[in-house]
Amino acid sequence: VFSNVTSCLLPVYSITATCTACPAGYISFRGGAANSNTTVFFLHSHVTQVDEVNCHACPSSFFCEGGPAHVQVQAGYWTLPLPLLWRYPWRVNSTLSDFVSACPSGACQPSTPLLYEHGVKSGGGLCTAGRDPASPLCSSCLPSFSYDMITEGCAHVDNWPASSLLF
């Protein structure tokens, strides 16, 4: 609501701000806010406060049910930490799917898929057991694990005898 209070020497404006959630099928890890740190546009007798929450379509590689920041990444896919993606400006023609990749066979098969609730990681992971979640596409094994060519997984090596040889 816009009003110019005439009893003041300088114009005083009143603004009503509302928050609109992402529509169904869209997600965001950035909550909107109405405060003095956001941009306010004055156009004739209309005032608009802009604070983009950056809603993006839920990729087919995610389950997005339960709210705009409730996401489960399906097994077989890898992505950067989702809250991190909302800290950086999005390119005009980018979609969230541009930041999700299919993993090599067997690399991203966690026992419990990665789950975010209310924008916070609440459980699970992206990688198969023994794989390093800090490596892109879960491509590396964790320390004290080694790649096993037979199973295409990462095998624990701490208990191997020194004379063992793997081919």
Image: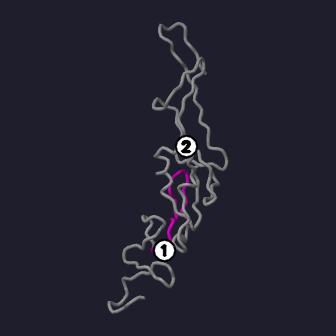
Where residue 34 sits: x, y (%)?
A: 52, 32
Rendered residue at 41%/88% (across/down): 166
The quadrant of the image that shows the N terminus is: top right
The quadrant of the image that shows the C terminus is: bottom left
Question: 104 or 67: which is nearer to us?
Answer: 104
Which residue ends up furthest to the front in the rendered image? 93
Horizontal relation, residue 136 to residue 16: left or right? left
Rendered residue at 58%/16% (across/down): 3
Which residue ends up furthest to the right in the rendered image? 24
Where residue 63 sits: x, y (%)?
A: 63, 58
Where residue 18 sits: x, y (%)?
A: 60, 32
Q: Quadrant of residue 15?
A: top right
Question: 108 or 6: which is nearer to us?
Answer: 108
The numbered disc on residue 129 is 1
Q: Residues within 10 Å of mark 2 (few under 14, many from 20)?
A: few
Q: Is residue 127 magenta?
A: yes
Rendered residue at 59%/47% (across/down): 56
The region drawn magenta spans 113-130
**Amino acid type for the residue under numbered disc 1:** Ala
Q: Are marks 2 and 1 in contact (CB under 8 Å)?
A: no
**Amino acid type for the residue under numbered disc 2:** Val
Q: Quadrant of residue 135?
A: bottom left
The numbered disc on residue 92 is 2
Horizontal relation, residue 115 to residue 131: left or right? right
Horizontal relation, residue 157 to residue 138: left or right? left
Q: Quadrant of residue 16?
A: top right
Which SS does the magenta portion mostly show? loop
